[in-house]
Image (tube, grey):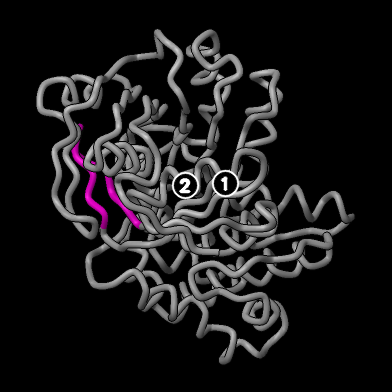
Amino acid sequence: MAVAGTADATARQRVAVIGAGAIGGTIAARLDAIGHDVTVTARGENLAAIREHGLRLRGAYGAHTARVTALESLAEAPDVAILATKATGTAAALEASRAALADVPLLVVQNGLGGERAAARLLGHDRVAGGIALMAANSMEPGVVTVTAAGDTIVGGAEGERFAALLGEALPTSLTPSIEGAQWTKLLINMVNALPAIVGHSVQDVIRDPGLRRVMLASMRETARIGLASGVRFQPLQGLTPLLVRLVAFAPRRIAQQVPLRIRDRLGDVPNLGSTQQSIRRGQPTEVDLINGAVVDAAARLGREAPVNAALVELVHEVERTGRFLPASAVRRLA
């Protein structure tokens, strides 16, 4: 269900965005642009740049410099908060701001599965919604976010309606009846991330390469099959319907490859690095264990294996360790 709004749809609110990277920075800048009182948390050069120059948004949602309050951790309780750190940083980010988040409605916008449940356990309250960002954004310069392709932000679960109303003012937003099913569909879409991080090319260029596209499709097949075998009810996201999920899982390869090709077309012409490669280029830990690794873990719970995703996890970690991208020829052999 799409949610639309205007600047008058909800009263001006004090919104804290924890993690002002590509996605968090986009959300924060857009909320600032429509008049909310926005505080962000950030670290290092990113924090310094936001304090000095503001949070600068470019690309598909227009240009805006958000003069937000920038902190290392929250000092006061906001009206609502949005957690947009990497999933690997959830515990540290929430611990740093725990006192300010007691009983504050929280939206967790992350890759992977069940981030909202993990946050609820850490905070000790269940006023936590799940969110999925379908936009494509790069954040390679401190304090600057470039949205390379627009897309919906999906919210659901506890407090879902509250955050749908808030974000619907600022960004294309939809409310899902099953955040778990939506997370699995996003997990399938996120199979575009590992290969660009391994070979150092854009998502679009990887999908254009027939051999790399074959490996990407193989990782998508594993994801779709394991999800379906686990009883997941995939939700429609970004044109990827439950029917197309089944096509990925079971159709002949020449037909199923239309799904990654459609993803490439949706990304447009501006090169998108993918979030995993962005982390590597910034020298930060990646989320590969919570993306491709989530498929491996789900398969293990069923007594199955996901060999392509397992291999991609290892190769991403190799690039993290060595700092060197691998030749495409070393990856094409996986499928």
Q: Which residues are magenta?
A: 136-147
**Residue type highlighted by circle 1:** Glu
Judged left or right of residue 53, residue 322 is right
Does the magenta-highlighted stretch encompass residue 30? no
In the depicted structure, whether residue 261 falls above or below residue 136: below
The residue drawn where x is 67% and y is 81% is 243
- SS at badge 1: helix
- SS at badge 2: helix
At label 1, counting other C-alpha atoms closer than 10 Å, the crowd grade (few under 14, some 14-19, many 20 or more) is some
In this figure, which residue is indicated by the disc labeled 1?
161
Q: Nearer the viewer, residue 106 or 287?
A: 106
In this figure, which residue is indicated by the disc labeled 2?
165
Residue 63 visible at all: yes
The residue drawn where x is 54% and y is 71% is 215
Magenta span main SS = strand
Q: Quadrant of residue 85?
A: top left
In the depicted structure, whether residue 88 falls above or below residue 196: above
Q: Quadrant of residue 144?
A: top left
